Every structure is written in C-alpha cells, then in structure tokens.
Amino acid sequence: MREITFSEATLEAMAEEMARDERVFVMGEDIARQGGIFGQFKGLPQQFGLDRVRDTPISETAIVGAGVGAALAGMRPVVDMHFADFITVCMDEVVNQMAKIRYMFGGQCTMPLVLRAPDGIIRSAAAQHSQSLEAWFVHVPGLKVVIPSNPADAKGLLKAAIRSDDPVLYFEHKALFPTKGPVPDGDHLTPIGKAAVVRPGRDLTVISYSMTMHRALEAAETLAGQGIDAEIIDLRTISPIDIDTIYASLAKTHRLLIVHEAVKAGGVGAEIAARVAEEAFDLLDAPIARIGAPFVPIPFSPALEKLVKTTAGDIVRAAQQLCR
Amino acid sequence: MNARPYGCEDLLRFYREMLRIRLFDLKAAELFAQGRMAGNIHTYVGQEAVAVGACQALEPGDLITATHRGHGHCLAKGGRADTMMAELFGKATGYCRGKGGSMHIADLGLGILGANGIVGAGIPIAAGSALASKIKGGREITLAFFGDGAANEGVFHEALNMAAAWRLPVIFLCENNRYGVSVSIDRVTNTADIADRAKGYGIPGVVVDGNDILAVCEAVAAAAGRARRGEGPTLLEAKTYRHRGHYEGDPQSYKPAAEIAAWKERDPLDRLKKTILAAHPDAAAALAGIAAAVEAEIAAAVRFAEDSPYPEPATVTSDVYAADNERSVAR
Amino acid sequence: MATNFTMPQLGLTMTEGTVGKWFKQLGEKVAAGEILAEISTDKITNQIEAPVDGTLLAVLVPEGGVAPVKAVLAVIGAPGEQIDPALQEVAAAPAEAAAVPAAQAVSHIQSAAGDGRIIASPLAKKLAKDKGLDLALVTGTGPGGRIVEKDILDFAARRAAAPKATPLAAKLAAEHGVSLAAIAKEDRIMAGDILAAVPAPVPIAAVPLSGIRKVISDRMALSWQTTPHVHNTVEVDMLEATSLKDKLAKLGTKLSFTELIVKCTAKALGEFPMVNNAFVDGGLVVNQAINIGIAVALDNGLIVPVVRNADRKTLAELRAEIAELAAKARQGKLLPDDYSGGTFTISNLGMYGVDHFTPIINPPESAIFGVCRTVPRPVVIDGAVVIRPMMNLCLGYNHRIIDGALAGKFMARVRELLEQPMLLL
Amino acid sequence: MRTVTYGQAISEALREEMRRDPAVFVLGEDMGVMGSVFGLTKGFLAEFGASRVIDTPISEAGFTAMAVGAALRGLRPVVEIMYVDFTPVCFDPIANQAAKMRYMTGGQAAVPLVLRAPGGAGRRNAGQHSQSLEALFTHIPGLKVIAPSTPADIKGLLKTAIRDDDPVVCIEHKLLYAAKGQIPDGEHLIPLGRADVKRPGRDVTLVAWSRQVGFALEAAGILAGEGIDAEVVDLRSLVPLDWDTLAASVRKTHRAVIVQEAVRRGGYGAELAAQIGEELFDSLDAPVKRIAGLNVVSPFSPALEDLTYPNPGTIAAGVRETLGRQP
C-alpha cells in the first residue's frame, strides 16, 4: 500500500494498462507536450512515444469520433476531454455513436473506449468549465459511467474501464487530482458496477460519489457526535447502479439521503430515489431526501460560487431532518 | 511600417488604446499572481495590434464576438477598464455582475456579443449576428475574433460555409499566435496559412502582419467595406504572438526561448512608437502624457474593483430566466 | 470466459464451510445476484449469490460436502465452454455486474420476514397515528401484505362495532387468526379466551440434527471431553447492586444485572489475565483484549454474540450493545464478526429460576460464568440472621491452565465488585 | 372551434407569429423550398421570403449557434432540428450558449429562441431516429421545455414560446402530426408551466406528456370498465413544471403512475417520482410507479420495438398493480 495523489494513481493506471496491452493508446488536447493540465499524463510520451500518446487539434467531435473508429478497428483508445463541459461539442459521438453501435450492429462488435472527463467546481472556472454532467449519460443505454472519489478507486476504476469492452465515461473531479490516499500495490482493479460501504452505520444511509463523498464523511463525523450513526456509501459507478448494496443498507437504516454536486433537478439522485421508492417502498420510514445544486448555471464570483456547492453542513441538516 | 494616411492624432489614439490593453493585462496578471482574483485569466499581452487595429477600422454600430483571451477585444471595442476589472474580481459592479468572469465579459450596448469559454463557439454566433443584420437590412457588420486552435473546430468550417453561401456581413479574424495551449499549429495542421482555407468557401483569405497595427487596420477596413457592400465575408489571418502563457501561471515550457525573444523584438507597441516618432518627432511629450493617463486609468480601475461589493447571495438564482419569478424546476 | 464460484470467507475465524444446498442444477442459467448456494459454518448459515451471469458448467462440491475457504465450488460460463481442468486459472477480467435489462414487471424488495417491521404505506401509518391505532393489530391486504388506507379505515370501523377486547386479547386474536366475534361473551374478552379458542398443536416427528443444532452438539461434546472442567460456586449478596439499580431507575437510567456482571467480570479479568487467556492445540494464547460473549437463547439453539473490549465500556454502552446484539441474534442478522473473538463467556439462566449451574466452556476460551437467579435468602451477618437478595455465581474453568487458587481469588474479586458496585467508579 | 391536425396547428402558430412580429423567422433543413419534411412550412417561402424562411446547409451546430447570435441581436429564430436525435450534434449551442448567455452576462443578454425537435418512437426508425431526449434538456438550467399532446395545446404553447424571451425546446412526437383535434378560433395562447387535467378521477393519478397522454386516456377508458377511476394529468410543460396541479391530484388519489416513452433510467419521470416521493410521502398509499421505455437502444424490428415502449395495455396493467390487483 502506498500514499499517492489521485492524478498519480490515474497515471499509474495508464502506464500499466498501456504496458500490458499495446492496443491501448491515449489522445486529447495538451496531453503529450504539456502532460495534461493536472499533470495526469506527465512522462507517458517519454515511455510510450508520441504515437500512443497523441496531442490533437482542438476538435472534440473529430477526436472522439476518431476514438470510436479506432475502437471499431480493434484498438482500445482512451480519449481525454480536457474538461467535461466540452462533451457538449461531441455529444453526438457519445450519445448516438459509441453508445449505440454495438446494439445497432446486433452485437457484431464491441466498443472498448474510455472517455476521461475532468469535471466539477474548482476555483471559479464559471459556467462553461465547472459543470458536473454525469446524469445525462445515465439516460443513455449502452454507456457505463464511473466516478472515483479517491486515488485507490481512481486507479482501480480506470484500469477496469480500459479493460472493459463497453464504452465507459470516466469522470474525475478536478479538485481531487492533488488529493492523496492509499493505493494497493500490484494489479489493483475496482469492479465496475460495485458500490463501497465506506462507513458502516445504523440510523441513516447516505449515498454519494466523487467530491461530495468527502463532504458526506465529514458530515458523518459531526452526526456521530449527535448520536446519528450514518452509513456512507460511495457509488463509484453510477450506471449501472449497484442497487443491491443500496437495498442491503436501506433494510438496516430505513432512511435514505442522496448527495451530489450536480444540479439536483434531473440529477443521479432523482433516478436512485425514483427506483428505490418504487421497488423498496416498504423499507422506507421517511421520504428519500436529495441534495444537489440549485437550478442555475455556475456563477463565477467566489461569493456566489460557494452558494451552489454542496457542503457538509447541508448534509448534516438534511440527516437531522430525516432522523427527527 | 510607414505612417501612410494616418495623421498624428490617429496614431496617438492607436497607441493609447494598445497601451490600455497592455497595462490592463499586465496589472491583471500581477493581481492574479497575488491571488487577488478567482478562477484563471488568459492575458492578451503581445497581440494588442490585432484588437485595436480591427476595432479602429470598425464603426461604433458594428459588433464583435471575443474569446477566452478577450480582455483586449473588449477594451479595444470601447469597454471600460474599471467595470472589466470588477468582473475579474467577481464583484457585483462587474460587466456580468460577477456571474461570468474573465471568459464571459460582454457589453451588448457596445456590440460586444461576449467572450466564450468554448473554443470556436463565437465564430457561428458572429455569423448569426451578421444574418440578423442582413435580415433587418442594417448597415452594421460583425467581426469574429478567434485563434488558430479554433480554426480546427467543426463550427469554423460550418460558419464560413454558411456566411459565404449567404454573403453575410461578417469578418472572420483569426489571431494565429502559433499555439493552442501547448500545441504549436504546425503539429496539428498541414498548411502554412489558415487563410488558405478561404478558397474552399470561395471567399478572400488574407494574411497580415498581426503586430503591425496599421496593416491590420487596413486589412479589416477593406474587409468591412466588402461586407457593407454585400460582397460577403472575409477570412483574415493576423500572424502574431502571445508574450505570456496560455493562462496566467503557465510556464510555457513548450515554447523555444529563441522564438519568444524573436517575437519580443517585434513588439507591436514599440513598432508603433518608432513609427510615430519617425513621422512626428515632437510627439514624444504626447506619448509620455498618454502613458501617465493610462496608468492612472488602470490604477483607478483596480481601486474601483477592490472597493466594489460582492454580489448579494439572493442574486445567485436570478438571471436564469427573463422573469425571475418563473416557478421553474429550481426546487 | 469461465468464472469460478469459490467458498466465501464468512467471518475472521472461518477456515472451511459446508455446502448446505445448491439452488441451481448443472447446466441451468444463472443471473448475477441470484442466490446460488447456501453455505453454513459452525456459527451461521448464509445464502451466497452468483457473481456473474452465465450457465452452471460444473459443481465440484456436492450438497453436504465440506471445502476450505477460497476452494472452487462451481464454475459459471457460456454453455459448452471448455473448463480449465486444472481449475487454477484466476478470472483475468474483473467480474462486472452485468446490467440486467430492466424487466417491465419490477421486482419488489420486501424487508426480511420476521424482522419485526410492520409493512404499511406512509398514508396508512399517518392515518393510524391520527386515529391512535396500533398498526400491529391491523392485517394488511395490500401487495405483499402491506397495510393500506382501506385496511385502517375498515379496522377503525370494525373496532367501533366489535365487542370489547383487551389489547392483548386483540393482539393474540390477530396472531392466531381467532375472530373476536366468534367468541360468545358479553363482557370484555380476555387473553385467556383467545388461547382457549386456539386449536391444540400437532406433535412433530423426530428430526435429525442439522445445521446449527448439529454444530452446538459437536462443540459441547468436544469441550466436555478435552477440557478438565472444574466448577466453583460463590454466593453473592446483591443488596447494594439492587439498591444501585433502584436509585438509577429513579434517575431515569435503566440498569440490569447483566451489564453489571459483565462490567465486574471484565474488571476482574483485567486483574487476573490468565482467566482471560485461551488454550489452543496444547498451547497458551495470551488475549490482550477482554471480549465477553453473552449466551443468547434462540428457537433452535443458542449463539454467543461478543461485546468487544468490555473493560473499556461504560455500563450504558454495555447495556445498549448487549441489547442490540441480542436483537440481531434473534433476527438471525448477526454478522460472523459479531460472534467471534470472545475471550470469556457469561451464560445467565437466572430468568429461568435456576439456582445451581455447571456451564460448559466455550472453546477456545478457558473459563465461563454460569449466573443463577437472585432470590431473597436468610444469611447470617454479624451474628444476626437477615434477609438478603442472594445470587449464586458459578465459574467453570479449564484446570489445564487455571488452578483452584487462581479461580478462587478471581471469583472473590468478582463477588467483591458485585457486592460493592461503587468500586467500579 | 375547428378540427385540425397537430401539424396544421403548428403551421398556424408559426404563420400567425411571423405575421405579428417581423423579428420572427424560421430556419432549418428543407424549411423553405420543401416546406419542411413534415410539410409544416408549406407556402411560407412565398409569403415571407427567403430571408425569413431559411434553408440551411446540414450544419446543426452551425445554424443553431447562428440562431443564438441572431437572437442576441433581437430577432426571434424558430430553429427546426429535423429529429431530436440530431440535437446532440448541436448540443454546445443549446447547453453552453443559449441556456447560459443570460446568466453569464449578468442579465444583459436574452436568447428568445425556440428549438423545435420532432422525436419519438413507433415508426421503426431504429436507434438514431426514434429517441425521446427531453430529460437531457430538463437537466439544463436556463432552458424551458414543452411537450404538448394535442393540436390546441401545441398551437397555444408554441405561440407563447415564440414570444418568450428565454430559449424554449419544443418536443413534438412525429406520430402526433396527423392526429386531429378541436382548436379554438382567434388568438389562442397557453402559458408555460400550466398542466391540464385531461380526465378527472379519484383512484389514481396518471401523469403523462406528448404522445403518452393519448395512451393514458385510452388506458383510463379500459380501467373505467373495471371500476378504476383514473385521473389523467397532461403536464404539457416540463420546465417550468406545474407542481401545484400535479400535487393536488396525487393528494386526492394517493397513487401516482408516471408514463414516459423515453428510456426509464434517468428519464424526466425520475425527477417527477423523486419530487412526489420527497414532498408527498405521507399522502402515498402505494409506490409511485414509472411505466417507461426499456433501458435499451431503440430496436428496429417491429417485433422488438413494440416490446420496448409503453402502450395502453401496459399502462392499464401498471395501474392495476399499483392498486394491488392482478395486472
């Protein structure tokens, strides 16, 4: 076990998988010469050459489209979106091409492609560089969506994503890149589709992922001091959702709170709440509560930006309300 | 660069406008480095001749779309230094009431249709503005500033094609500063000049020395004339160079030192100053006066930004829709 | 690519398990998350799910067979797929949970039966609260027996018209399916009336020992045969303990003898560590922690959930934890970690009115307390005969490592603490 | 009152608004000479001229962004994206430009743009021509989304949308174009954010929009024969949502069944179910059920497509299950 940063963990994953399988290559804007804006590709070109670590023109539609083509031709491409907000520029490649090709071709081919998308609010990047857009892709059959909250899962999920034969969207919160955490040695894989109970508890289940996982754990400590024992679950994969882990927890706590940084209306919390309330109605002793951003674009000014971010305080208040 | 038809008064005005941009962005970079601003900023230092040359050739009613490196475009189009600095500080008195920040400065009254955080996104928006002019039968034209990187976005090709097909009154001004963040243009294109792409859409493609303000001014004036005569769009490529990083704090390790030094030799401000003094040796005092006045303007802008209040928390949910009482799904 | 279904690790101390039951036959299709097999260990039986979709290609350990942890029990893969005879191949690709297509008919997750939860819609719960109704008395007609609005309204109406019955009688009637109206009685129907109306139970044929019953019998025999048990009994004057209990009750905090005994025993074990050690394979194992197991009676046997670090917990914490462990034990929801790692066990038969008790040690522990009932008895104190609430406390210990003298000193210390609870502060 | 088709109602709305305000113009592929592939702008070129009825090249990103630019200049473009399935091609102009311009400019800019997006399944058009993607738009702050189900509603809502100063996405189901319905004469406007109880009832609330409203009404007819009185609430407008009408209905019937043609997982119905569960928990006598498309790419073969989407039969079965009866 070693203590390394989130971005180092992703770098290790890339290096290991590229060494293990020469079909794996990575392309994106400013990844080779500059090593990625968060240093997450530093050193890769020196190790694998500029053919397998390619700087591209600023042409998101063409880059991702080329990725789809390379995957069809037997490669296992990793495409870096630079910012998750730019997915809108190549939305057709994601929604209508990579997600659908296998089904539309009747299973003739697989689509082993990973789209890496740094997302989330970081230091006043404003409305077009701070979004969390994962909910869109929960709605697109054919895609898998994974979101690590710590270095161990960052490495484990990226390796699993690269080895998956399905197209995987890998969202990595920009503010997490410098954070440190323990990462197991050796061929460490985190299974896609499996959540993790990060903190067992009896009174309430809190589901979260990515940055807000850390807010949830902070809140759990405060709540413990007030006699509320919160079970914290890190989804890690938001499509397909590990519904069994959720039901096992709910069968114990009977209270559910879902927390994410993305806009609340139509967020991942909506799908979980709707499905759990329909299928496990009898396990609920209280309404399922959700926390997410208000229905506004993300403001630039720090004075306003902090008002749209989910805080540990929000989680504590919602938990107290649920356990009244 | 010879003074040609511009009188001393024009040349001094050009100089003042370029100096405003230079000092604004150097001060912004300084304040950013001290952590006095949020987010990040992309400064325009070194490319002033393109913005000023272009805007001086436009009429007040004309419009522009800017980019994430748009402080210079907006100041050159008549933007106020204090309101812009306040926006960079995220203050309520900023151009966008603190909600947009450096990459989204806009002043629709001045015809600034806004900077943009998505590379290339301003190009078709400018064409749309030109379409509006054509439909309304207005005299105004629209100019799109964009970089060499944006020239590789899909919308660049779509916008040029449509504008050409419908002879829209728009000027596509590519500021080729040789780098898309760290990637030099030659590594991601196969042509020496982006202007050559104009042939594909049957419109003029003109390369111009982006550091020669008079050359830029003439080229834009010619293109504006075509546009106003209904002869359609022009693709201009101004060869220029940014003295500082893609973003403030970028070490620019991807740039050879010799290249940086060479381009600093051809600094647009120095070249204009030489031209002025060659044609009007007695203008030295005027130049010094301009420098003092601009420094004062920038200092006042900083004070204004610092003294301005942050936006009220309640404003975080306003300006999403026209009528703020819209009971949207903001539950 | 074939995936191996291996013997899971259920709890820290588990080394092997028995395959109780296969839920799928050879060649049958299996879906990820579906129950595939029932595995039992010496402590508990668990149902294990299939890790991936596929077809059951091979069953390597038949029902009743025993296999060590991580051994391959079965292989799942595509029909007709070649199985690696050596069976050592580790599945390279991670076992991804296949996205089971959302069937149009949505499966309903019910809470585990018998876990004491009343299944009622929020509306029904609200109505019941408003009308002051006890939901436990209402039978649900909604899907899966859920109590719905109609049931509450019907119940309220019936109650208004129905003959008077005591709440206990109504509850027993509901449980045993006896209709109140069927009992011809003018005045209030009592519990006895209901019991009289319940049909007599049918005798049950002899059933071979299996599962947990079998495990208990094996362990008891093993312990009795290999461990030289010696039992010492002391009589403990519970006067002070009883008055402490009453005083605390007045202050609103409950205290029962169970946690008091655990607290005193834990403190004494700290002072006499040998009694807390274990005896395994002829060797002595020194236990740092003092983890006290509490024997809990179940319908089909008993289980011993463990209170870890009992010496470091307050009486209130012990009380809460013992109550919770007991509840989980009765609900069959104890996790393997809850009932392993014990260093000393306490078995209390006081509630059954037992006066003398020679408990059998719970291996690998070295000693066990048998707690009898507390009953007022005449004792001589300072020459005078007085009535005192006396409790017999019996220590069974492994004479291999604990001698009588040590046992005696340990017992005396526990008695002293029980008779002077103030010493605990 | 007159009887017209859904498609004719759209043409009437567009023509009336273009006559009323010169700033209104339509653009899209085949809108001028051909009068749109669904025949909705027939005769427009002759009446309004090529500068207000524009045939664009096949450049959705280009002409949608241009429409945003024209809107910034005070024009009122009505863009047609031939299939909602193509909106991902122009998602940046919609999600990052139109939706955010007002907010990012601190209220300076307005984008009075309408984006018409014909969509929906049932015509065996397979994966890339059968989708319902409203859930992508309802997650974007700054956009409004309408999904009318009848000629009268589409005319009233489209006219309001064109006059609205914010960007509005109008979801039109292709199989509704030929559907007939009564339409009032003269100026007919319906405000956004106002739902319509198309059939009052006591036992269960059926929530639907666009084509599923018709299916829900048909199912309600079947259920009436079995003594189940279903109330059908036609949302008409997804953002803003008429929460009060929806909540009042659920408080009355204590049961909600949401009918949605789009893929179940992450659909707009999820947000509705989550809000009902969060705010009306104590009124619920049964779980809120979603009857929706399977989580699959839309299959081509009729044999498969018919299994993929809700129909009156599956809706009725879902309601019976919610009431605890045999489906």
Image (spheres, rainbow, N blue to C red):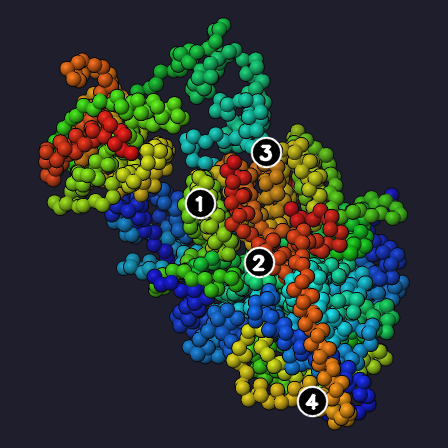
Callout 1, which amino acid? Answer: Glu
Residue B92 lies left or right of residue D78; in this view the side is left
Q: Pick the quarter of the image with the C terminus of chain C.
A: top left
* Cα separation between marks 2 and 1: 24 Å
Describe the element under mark 3 as helix, strand or loop: helix
Say which residue appears at 45% left-offset and 31% top-offset. Answer: C117
Disc on res. A132:
2
4 vs 2, front mark = 4
User: Pointer 4 indicates a residue of which chain?
Assistant: B
What residue sits right under mark 1 in the picture?
A231
* Cα separation between marks 1 and 4: 68 Å
3 vs 1, front mark = 1
Residue A182 lies left or right of residue B313; in this view the side is left
Residue A69, given in percent of the width and then of the height, sits at 55, 71
Q: Residues within 10 Å of mark 4 (few under 14, many from 20)?
A: some
Contact between labelled residues 4 and 1, with CB atoms less than 8 Å apart: no
Quarter assignment of residue C336: top left
Callout 3, which amino acid? Answer: Asp
